[in-house]
Image: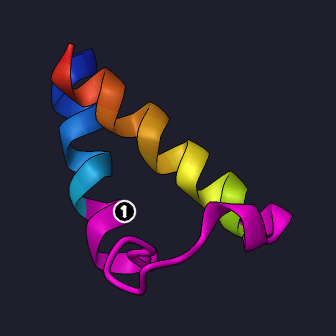
Amino acid sequence: MKKKFFKMLSRFNKKVLPSYSKKQLDLQKASKVQMAIIGWKLWVTKNALD
């Protein structure tokens, strides 16, 4: 159940949130909001894969 939820949330994130890797964002110059989005996507992906 938990894994299914995170997979669904991951698909939603992919469609809605921006992809900073495609934009080649420098993490040293990222704003706090951008860092929060990166952290959120990382957390969701980690839980979807476990």
Measured as percent of width and height from the top left, residue 26 is found at: 59, 71
* Extent of the magenta region: 12-33
Q: Is residue 28 left or right of residue 24?
A: right
Which quadrant does the N terminus fall into? Answer: top left
As shown in the figure, which amino acid type bears the numbered disc 1?
A: Asn
Which quadrant does the C terminus fall into? Answer: top left
* Quadrant in which residue 5 is drawn: top left
Residue sitting at x 55%, y 45%: 40
Q: Which residue, as the protein is rendered here, is positioned at the far right?
A: 32
**Vertical relation: 31 (above or below) 40:** below
Residues 21 and 15: in front is 21
Residue sitting at x 81%, y 71%: 31
Residues 29 and 14: in front is 29
Q: Is residue 42 left or right of residue 7?
A: right
* Quadrant in which residue 3 is drawn: top left
**Vertical relation: 40 (above or below) 28:** above
Residue tagged by mark 1?
13
